[in-house]
Image (cartoon, rainbow, N blue to C red):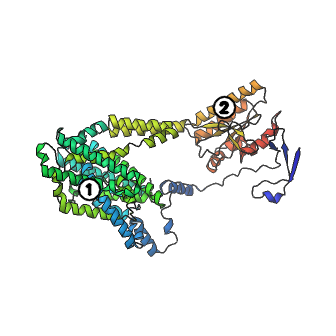
Amino acid sequence: MYIYIYIYAGAFKMSGRVGDEIQMNETASGDISIGPLPYIHKLGKPPKQNLLKEIITAAKETFFSDDPLRSFKDKPKSKKFVLGVQAVFPIIGWARNYSLSKFKGDLIAGLTIASLCIPQDIGYAKLAYLPPQNGLYSSFVPPLVYAFMGSSRDIAIGPVAVVSLLLGDLLQAEIDPNDLIPYRRLAFTATFFAGLTQLALGLLGIKKNFTKKTDIVSVLRSVFNSAHHGWNWQTIVIGVTFLAFLLVAKHIGKRNRKYFWVPAIAPMISVVVSTFCVYITRADKDGVQIVNHIEKGINPVSANDLFLSGEYVGKAFRIGVVAGIIALTEAIAIGRTFATMKDYQIDGNKEMVALGTMNIIGSLTSCYVATGSFSRSAVNYMSGCHTAVSNIVMAGVVFLTLELITPLFKYTPNAILASIIIAAVVNLLDYEAVILIWKIDKFDFVACMGAFFGVVFMSVEIGLLIAVSLSLAKILLQVTRPRTAVLGKLPRTSVYRNTLQYPEARKIPGVLIVRVDSAIYFSNSNYIKERILRWLAEEEELVNENNLPRIQHLIVEMSPVTDIDTSGIHALEELYKNLQKKEVQLALANPGTIVMEKLYASEFANEIGENNIFLSVGDAVHVFAPKTSNTEEP
């Protein structure tokens, strides 16, 4: 049966195809095949670009992909100045619309996260082998700086377990924590370089007798032995009882979001109750180790304590870069998570600048590396915070704590700090995420397990090294061994897809269609050439076995090929010459603008012939299929 459809030329002006008649044949199987079109659209040759303009555009897309200056366009100088100040201090923008109702929410949220951060700060400082007051200092100055410069409304700033653990491990490898003064100086210097690293990335747009190991086994052991004490029944009772209380409080908060405040205030309740019990029973005289002393008063200036010369500068720089990048990654991930939940955007560059600035200032005021805390940020979010004022409220409570009530922590048992730390790091074991990673990507699962076992049995540093090494190996493998696929035509369509994904896709007799799913560079060009030739050899074997028409045309689908270098061009030239020897015609389908520019610049487009470069695979098939002996139209 034949169906004739008449189409006027004007109907296809937008597509670039014009014709008077298209014949559609209905086959015995019910498939409809389209006859040859009288005109095939010629692939456009890209106009030659100005070199300077091309370099500027590439630099802009590389370093300023989000076009940070777009809001300054066509604005008067006074407005540009205001926008410039607002870009550095976002608080100026949202403060104009701040209201009493928002302050109520921020006040409640700030008080809630303060009750959580104070006991955590004391415990996390111990993980970094620093005096407890340094943990409190880091929840006073940095949150104030971030409130003025950060773009996230929900993130809560302060010390976190992972960074404290990592920093302590790297610092104690250089200076004994018992040598407190130089140890603190190195910590402040590392914090300075951490802030400097974060700031640079933003501007470019891109305690005693803790174990000296940071594997989980050693850390858990050191947590319970954090201040010289041996095992005694009072310490065990305090630790186990309050750890159970904290875990139950966490469970209640997870089961019912209305009770989010329960796990938030549980650490402070644990500290108050345990301190009171130790005080009235004088359990410290029976071997229960206590905090003893926290210096009263706000952050002392530490600018003169930085190592700006000598042997420790390089060591502090190395430690600071590692800790700064880890802290930055955690903070931005947390900020984006809650921004997505509240449907607003955060500026990655502003976040880096804010975090870097607060850590630089923090290093000058006796703080160590601070970042966004997921547990505190979650409590901040669920408490109903509206803006970064909640950080200011939290800092205010920490200020009052430092000025007025630090002596009350004298009898706080170290065992309760251990319980708080353990309860906080339990959430780091996210088995659901591991299962998801296994389902999505087995190589990522291997990297995840490598990092996990490296941290558990060796150290945080080794675990990170394993994860980074495996991730780089994966990237290298993907670059050097990109995917290729043989395409076939889906029935009743003009669409060509991977025959492995769509087994019903039919191959075109006499034509082999191969898709390259990667840019073609020196690292993979030879592999791609050899893989295409192997596809051809395998196809020719099938053709010979089944007495089908021999392969006369090879079409390379290049729409996924985003770029090509000199080695890639040479690989195509070698492929073309090999195919000529086999009397197979090479054709390219839908190369992008950049690829086309380089094909013409290298004269390969002329060598292969412009008539063998097509807008789509379908166009190439319509040209080649009729020329193939004993073929049937697709």
Q: Is residue 313 above or below residue 349?
A: above
Q: Residue 6 in the image: x percent, y percent?
A: 86, 54
Element type at marker 1? helix
Q: Give, as a three-letter code, the residue at label 2.
A: Trp
Task: For label 2, count other residues whose C-alpha is less than 10 Å away and answer few (under 14), some (14-19) or many (20+).
Answer: some
Residue 295 can be seen in this image: no
Give the mark count: 2
Task: For label 1, count other residues whose C-alpha is less than 10 Å away and answer few (under 14), some (14-19) or many (20+).
Answer: many
Q: Is residue 92 left or right of residue 440?
A: left
Q: Give, as a three-letter code, the residue at label 1.
A: Ile
Point 24% across, 57% down: residue: 137
Q: Residue 612 in the image: x percent, y percent?
A: 73, 42
Residue closer to the observer: 238 or 26: 238
Q: Is residue 171 left or right of residue 559?
A: left
Point 81% across, 54% down: residue: 18
Q: Is residue 560 left or right of residue 506?
A: left
Q: Residue 609 in the image: x percent, y percent?
A: 73, 42
Q: Would you name the residue on which mark 1 appears?
A: 118
Residue 269 image label? none
Give the spatial CA distance, label 1 vs label 2.
64 Å
Q: Is residue 52 above or below residue 148?
A: above
Q: Would you name the residue on which mark 2 appears?
A: 535
Residue closer to the observer: 571 or 624: 624
Do the residues under discs 1 and 2 have CB atoms within 8 angstroms? no
The disc, 1 or 2, on the residue closer to the chain's N-terminal end is 1
Element type at marker 2? helix
